[in-house]
Amino acid sequence: MSGGGLLEKAMGQQMSSDGESMVNEVVAEALPQPIPSRKFEISLPVKIGAAVGLLAFILMWFLDSYTLQDIVDPVPFGLIPLSLFAGSFYMVWNGLGRQKTVVIVICYLMLAAVPYIAGMTFSESITISESELSDDSTEITLTIRGSSPASSADVSITYGGESVYQENLPFSIDRSDGIGDYGEITLLVSDWYSGNSHSSNDYVVTVSAGSSEASFLLQSIHLQRTIDDVKSATAASIGTGADCDSSKDSCVIGVALTAWAGLDAIGSNPPGGLPYADYTLDATLTHESGTVAISYPTVTVVNGLAQWDSGNGQYGGGSANVGAEGSQLPLEGSVDDFNLNTRYIPIEDWGTDDYGCYEFTVSVTQNSPWSDGTAVTYTSFYDYEEQGGDQENDPNNTNPQDTEEAWTVTNSC
């Protein structure tokens, strides 16, 4: 009895212990389990990708600036933020997991579109992208790109820092092309021209429309109209044989005249060409006695085209282009000389053919606003003389030699 009782007690205690353990396990499973704590970490590639994406986002805003687009070509410049966005996307894509591709793509598209949407909706900016000279060189047209609701613009021009023009002109962004929307303003050059444009005296135009303003440096070549240097030269056409008297080996049968008018050059170099200058030019060859040998017809130059009365071919063809390829203007005669590569004025058409010193004077005048009307002149000098005729050891000149005529440059008469 006692042994059986002990065994029963032991078995009862084991069952009690097992039952309690099972109950504890069931209760533990039924109760909510604590969530293990995890520390959220962003990988280095994702951080770098996000920073690159932010930089690209900032640069995209600059692409909406017309002023910046005017300075830097927008096509290669736009590749910079696009490349940054691509690199950023790749790094974030790999770092966060490719299963999130759709979400990442949408986020990047929204980031890239925000600057353009905001720019189209809220921005008002203009930039002067170019200037174009009219065919007759009297007007300059400004192309103004951007966005502005203004119907007029305040236009001002400075020359060498000094104001030379201020006016309110009609203006609107009412045109478009493959680049974008734009408007135009046309300016009459004679309204504000004040002198030749160069490095220390530039023309700067400023346009204010609405809340936007833009400035532009006008092209110097379009605004160089004042003649400040003139040169003159002649070259003799030399004849031989039947061209001369029987007593002469060679003789002057005519002269070719040349004038230069343009920008002052260094030293004795010919003046620089002015393709858009308007002026009149007079040229005269005068003997030292005061007798006029050649009075060339007045030459009128307008927008690079020189014209004069040809006298039915006595003075060349009556027209020539000057300025675009230099300031040289041949004052042609009626006879070709292939050695001189021009046409000369034969000596029989001169007012006098006496030997002596000759002055060739070129005078250029311009009207306002290109000049104050003061003539710019230049004179070159030439000796026309007969050389030879005496034989050595023959003081009585009983057997004279044939003579030669010469036309040479001299310093003065």
Image: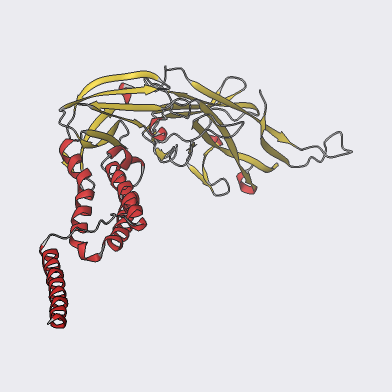
Would residue 101 be found to the left or right of residue 23 on screen?
right
Q: Position of residue 79 (x, y in %)?
A: 33, 53
Picture residue at 13% right of the left edge, 59% below the top: 32
Of 229 and 286, nearer the camera is 229
Picture residue at 20% right of the left edge, 48% below the top: 113
Of 80 and 35, nearer the camera is 35
**Residue found farthest to the right:** 393
Q: Is residue 119 above or below residue 24?
A: above
Q: Quadrant of the C terminus?
A: top right
Would residue 128 be found to the left or right of residue 234 on screen?
left
Q: Is residue 15 above or below residue 56?
A: below
Picture residue at 74% right of the left edge, 42% below the top: 402
Would residue 355 be found to the left or right of residue 169 on screen?
right
Q: Is residue 321 visible?
A: yes
Of 367 and 220, nearer the camera is 220
Count of marks overlaid on the render: 0
* Corner quadrant of residue 185: top left
